[in-house]
Image (tube, rainbow, N blue to C red):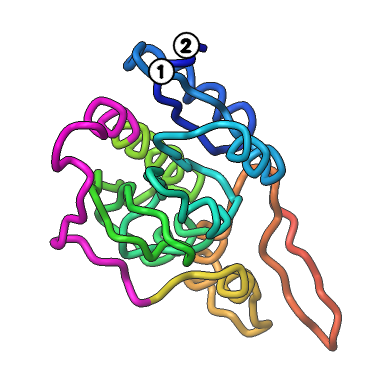
Amino acid sequence: MNSNQKIVGILSFESFSKELCVIAESIRNDLSFVPIFSKDQLQLLFKEKQFELLVSFGSSIIVPKKILDIKGLTSINIHAASPDYPGRDPHHFAVYNNVKKYGATMHFMINKVDEGGIIDVEIFSVKSSINPNELLMNANDAGLKLFKKLLKNFDKKNYLKINKKYKWSNKKYTRKDFEKLCNLSDDIEKNEFIKRLNACSFPGYNNLFLNIDGKKFQIITNE
């Protein structure tokens, strides 16, 4: 790492943050990129180094306010969902709502999740038969386009600014909302069951369940 180069932190889960750094290095060889994949590592690195930019993409880590408030630091999050779907598990709700358009959102980070001013959005059309995993992968691809655009332009004058034509939805989805979506009543109609079955599916997980007489029964599906 060249000591004179500006430093960019890439926050995600371990394998993806390293992959993003490789992509970033192919775009900007004038910057130093540091993969970050834990809260402890994040806090330690920001004590040791002076970062120019922090980019969070696909991370569940909430960046502490004391880091967001560092003078000279720009903190950006790439949310793998449209502005209509802030919060947790957006791809599941988007499938349940049968969205026709979806995408990824790039925004400034503030000390409230998915509320910072929106810089840019990448939108794509959604096929009617899509499942949540496919939608998430497509949204990540859209987010990657925003990530590349950010790296090429973030230090250009007037690039990093709020685009007022984009607004977050007032509804921010939570884990409790997803659990409610997965919780089936014993008198559920067939069409609603099929809709929930698709919307709540994800490889490696059996999310649907029934509560009967105070007991929770998980619904096992064959993938």
Residue 60 locus on image (x, y percent) = 59, 51
Which residue is nearer to you in this view: 111 or 37? Answer: 111
x 65%, y 44%: residue: 43
The image quarter containing residue 85 is bottom left
Residue 216 locus on image (x, y percent) = 81, 74
Residue 65 locus on image (x, y percent) = 53, 60
Question: Residue 138: which disc?
Answer: none
Amino acid carrying label 1: it is Gln
Residue 11 locus on image (x, y percent) = 54, 38
Tag 1, which secondary structure? loop
User: Dominant secondary structure of the magenta stretch?
Assistant: loop
Amino acid carrying label 2: it is Asn
Tag 2, which secondary structure? loop
x 26%, y 34%: residue: 154
| Highlighted range, magenta | 147-170
The total number of labels drawn is 2
Q: Is residue 114 above or below residue 201?
A: below
Q: Is residue 203 left or right of residue 191?
A: right
Q: CA distance from mark 2 to mark 1?
A: 5 Å
Which residue is nearer to you in this view: 56 or 218? Answer: 56
Which residue is nearer to you in this view: 15 or 24? Answer: 24
Crowdedness near tag 2: few (<14), some (14–19) or many (≥20) residues, C-alpha within 10 Å: few
- Asked whether 32 falls inside the magenta stretch, the response is no
Q: Is residue 70 left or right of residue 208?
A: left
Asked if disc 2 and disc 1 are in contact, CB closer than 8 Å, the reply is yes
- Asked whether 164 falls inside the magenta stretch, the response is yes
Q: Is residue 223 above or below residue 119?
A: above
Find disc 1 in the rendering and name its residue: 5
Question: Residue 2: which disc?
Answer: 2
